[in-house]
């Protein structure tokens, strides 16, 4: 019985995850997952899933239908079965939505399968060492919480047998202080492949709330995939109009600014963060920039100089996503196209609306870098 229940539960989970995979594009587009994000899991609303089964009708409700019939002919008692909003209250349940918890790792696997994303080959894999404590040894002193009960009683048993105190007919093992043994740890250095993600977002007056929502949704999925690929992920956030500021995650998504635009200020802030926190030889660095492409014209040459001298040589990927805005000129992406052929790590994407997020993620992450 237990095995049958386990099999049914696993089958149900497979059905639910199949439904999520089927509708993944819709979840990505509307940001439903991001709003339900927990520490390790996400609650996803899916339509109620029921196992098909035969249901007997009422006794004497009618005989077997005969003849070919016509399209739309009702079957069974009651004539027309379609509700029209009139008549007595019904007894059948309506449609329901079920909240299903899915881990972020499972989401990343679904994303990879849906977008055919290749696994990333990290660099600097043996350069960064993380210190972990492993309980792999024994010592004679320690706190009660780390006492090794089995070894303590074995030691007490040996002592009692050697002293002739153990009676097999009345087996009593009474440890004394000298019998106690405790678990102990040793620090172990393990190779760790880490990734640094630097997000840059234009928050000038031409960026609307809809454009910022696009950035928020796309960033969630980028984070989900990269965390699946790396042992540790560090994030930094930059917002800018004419001046750039390094901010925390909450400010990055909620800030409202106005004014002109100097993209070079964001690039300078990004370069400072790389030099300060992430030595390129040891870190896998990913830069994601989002803007509507409306930059102060005289700033473009300065942007390209900082980008080519201080950022692109150090990045696994530099991804520029230009979101469509009713106010921005959209000219900046043309400047980047001038140099794109020289830098294979540069990826450009034009995001017209939320429906384009899905394809933009594939464009950014589909290279396996």
Image (cartoon, rainbow, N blue to C red):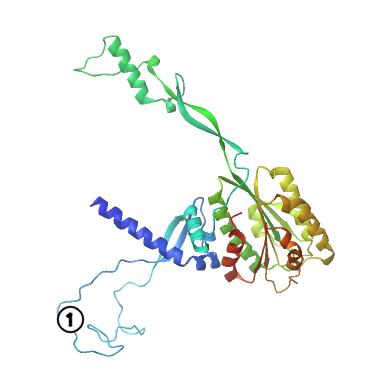
Quarter of the image with the C terminus is bottom right
Is 130 above or below relative to 318? above
Which residue does the numbered mark 1 point to in the structure image? 61
Pinpoint residue 215: horizontal percent, then vertical percent.
63, 62
State the residue lying farthest toward the front. Answer: 342
Task: Report whether 140 appears left or right of 76.
Answer: right
- Label 1 SS: loop
* Residue 185 in sight: yes
Viewed as shown, does residue 319 lie left or right of 118?
right
Q: Above or below — where is 202 with respect to 198?
A: below
- Residue at 58% x, 60% y is 366
Q: Residue visible at 73% across and 51% down?
A: 313
Residue 362 x/y as whole percent: 58, 63
Camera-nearest residue between 295 and 341: 341
Does residue 6 appear left or right of residue 40 in this picture? left
Give the answer, above or below, for where 350 lies relative to 264. below
Residue placed most toward the observer, 318 or 35: 318
Q: State which quadrant residue 346 falls in.
A: bottom right
Q: Is residue 243 visible?
A: no
Report the residue that reaches farthest toward the left.
60
- Using the rendered view, name the quadrant where residue 70 is placed: bottom left
């Amino acid at each position: 019985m237990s095995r049958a229940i386990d099999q049914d539960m696993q089958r149900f989970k497979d059905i639910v995850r199949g439904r999520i995979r089927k509708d993944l594009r819709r979840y990505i587009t509307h940001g439903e997952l991001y709003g339900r994000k927990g520490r390790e899991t996400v609650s996803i609303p899916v339509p109620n899933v029921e196992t098909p089964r035969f249901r007997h009708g009422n006794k004497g409700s009618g005989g077997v239908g005969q003849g070919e019939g016509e399209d739309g002919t009702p079957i069974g008692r009651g004539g027309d079965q379609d509700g029209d909003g009139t008549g007595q209250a019904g007894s059948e349940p309506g449609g329901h939505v079920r909240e299903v918890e899915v881990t972020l790792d499972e989401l990343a696997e679904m994303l990879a399968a849906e977008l055919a994303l290749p696994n990333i080959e990290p660099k600097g894999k043996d350069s960064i060492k993380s210190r972990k404590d492993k309980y792999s040894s024994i010592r004679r002193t320690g706190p009660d919480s780390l006492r090794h009960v089995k070894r303590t009683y074995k030691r007490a048993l040996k002592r009692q047998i050697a002293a002739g105190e153990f009676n097999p007919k009345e087996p009593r093992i009474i440890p004394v202080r000298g019998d106690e043994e405790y678990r102990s740890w040793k620090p172990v250095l393990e190779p760790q492949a880490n990734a640094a993600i630097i997000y840059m977002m234009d928050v000038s007056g031409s960026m609307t709330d809809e454009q910022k929502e696009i950035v928020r949704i796309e960033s969630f999925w980028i984070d989900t995939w990269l965390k699946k690929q790396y042992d540790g992920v560090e994030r930094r956030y930059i917002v800018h109009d004419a001046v750039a500021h390094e901010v925390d995650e909450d400010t990055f998504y909620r800030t409202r600014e106005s004014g002109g635009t100097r993209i070079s200020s964001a690039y300078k802030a990004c370069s400072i963060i790389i030099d300060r926190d992430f030595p390129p030889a040891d870190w896998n660095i990913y830069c994601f920039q989002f803007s509507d492409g409306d930059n102060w014209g005289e700033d473009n040459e300065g942007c390209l100089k900082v980008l080519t001298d201080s950022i692109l040589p150090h990045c696994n990927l530099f991804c520029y996503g230009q979101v469509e805005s009713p106010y921005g000129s959209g000219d900046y992406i043309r400047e980047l196209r001038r140099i794109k052929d020289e830098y294979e790590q540069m990826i450009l994407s034009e995001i017209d609306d939320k429906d384009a997020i899905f394809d933009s993620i594939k464009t950014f992450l589909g290279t396996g870098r």
